[in-house]
Image (spheres, grey):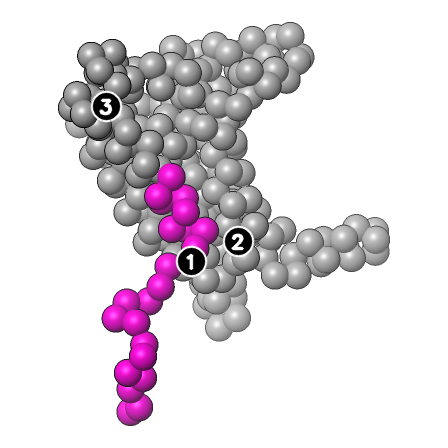
């Protein structure tokens, strides 16, 4: 077996996954520095709450847009900012681990713009589902709906691989079934949370978007529309 002496010790991550992870980490690092009194003075201790209020997804604002039938940019930007704000350092670490692990596999199969489409598409879908499902004042925050979008894209890759080998495609959904089962068990023990709706919607959007953003997916869709 030949060995390449110039090969890196670990497989490199796709640059887009590194950029997303660094952005998530940078926000948390600033909040941690403020809470520790390293930057911002005494007022920085409350930065996390302020950021959650200003950049998290807030259902009453979403409901107001629905009632008025108006898309307000000063509300709508939250669809894209809430994935970068977390309630704690621990939550951020778990989210980044998900992004790095699943994003590596997705990023190696899809283009940069496709990865971004899945990340933000899943985030938007998660927020919409959360806003439609619950009448709540609990702010939606964190990267997990986007991470579940990567789970959806990874499941799509498995689904296609199983199809090419004429095996049961339902096996591709074992991971999401396991994670949803864990969330159910957690809810039974510690109390249910409405966040699972956002996660499941993120997964579904990631899976569906994969048909479109896969290599040649857009051309295939246009060709089918022309045939009809």
Q: Pointer 1 and pointer 2: residues touching (CB < 8 Å)? A: yes
Magenta stretch: give its range: 1-23
Residue indicated by mark 3: 39
- Up/down of 89 relative to 35, above or below: below
Dot 2, crowdedness within 10 Å: few (<14), some or many (≥20)? Answer: some
- Up/down of 10 relative to 32, above or below: below
In the image, taking residue 74 as reference, residue 130 lies left or right, namely: left
Of callouts 1 and 2, the N-terminal one: 1
Quarter occupied by residue 25: top left
SS for dot 2: helix
In this view of the protein, can residue 190 be seen by the observer? Answer: no
In this view of the protein, can residue 212 be seen by the observer? Answer: yes
Q: Quadrant of the N terminus?
A: bottom left
Residue 15 lies within the magenta run: yes
Alpha carbon distance from label 1 to label 2: 8 Å
**Can you tell which of label 3 and label 1 is closer to the viewer?**
3
Residue indicated by mark 2: 112
Q: Please report the residue visible at 25 percent of the width from the left and 41 percent of the height from the top.
A: 94
**Can you tell which of label 3 and label 2 is closer to the viewer?**
3
In the image, taking residue 75 as reference, residue 38 lies left or right, namely: left
The percent position of residue 144, horizontal first and vertical second, equals 36, 36
Q: Please report the residue visible at 40 percent of the width from the left and 32 percent of the height from the top.
A: 83
Alpha carbon distance from label 3 to label 1: 32 Å
Residue indicated by mark 1: 14
Of callouts 3 and 1, the N-terminal one: 1
Q: Pointer 3 and pointer 2: residues touching (CB < 8 Å)? A: no
The percent position of residue 122, horizontal first and vertical second, equals 49, 38
Main SS, magenta region, reads: loop
Quarter occupied by residue 154: bottom left
Judge by depth and name the residue closer to the eye, 11 or 44: 44
Alpha carbon distance from label 3 to label 2: 34 Å
């Amino acid at each position: 077996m030949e060995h390449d002496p110039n090969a890196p010790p670990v497989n490199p991550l796709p640059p887009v996954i590194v950029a997303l992870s660094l952005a998530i980490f940078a926000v948390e690092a600033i909040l941690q520095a403020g809470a520790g009194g390293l930057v911002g003075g005494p007022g920085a201790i409350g930065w996390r709450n302020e950021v959650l209020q200003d950049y998290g997804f807030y259902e009453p604002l979403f409901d107001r847009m629905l009632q008025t039938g108006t898309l307000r940019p000063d509300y709508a930007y939250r669809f894209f900012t809430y994935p970068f704000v977390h309630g704690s350092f621990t939550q951020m670490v778990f989210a980044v681990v998900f992004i790095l692990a699943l994003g590596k596999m997705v990023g190696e199969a899809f283009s940069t713009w496709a990865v971004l489409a899945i990340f933000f598409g899943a985030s938007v879908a998660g927020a919409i589902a959360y806003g439609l499902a619950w009448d709540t004042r609990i702010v939606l925050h964190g990267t997990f709906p986007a991470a579940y979008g990567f789970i959806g894209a990874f499941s799509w890759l498995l689904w296609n691989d199983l199809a090419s080998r004429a095996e049961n495609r339902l096996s591709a959904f074992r991971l999401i079934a396991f994670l949803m089962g864990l969330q159910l068990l957690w809810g039974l023990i510690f109390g249910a949370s409405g966040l699972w709706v956002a996660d499941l919607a993120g997964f579904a959007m990631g899976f569906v978007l994969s048909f479109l953003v896969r290599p040649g997916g857009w051309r295939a869709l246009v060709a089918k529309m022309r045939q009809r």
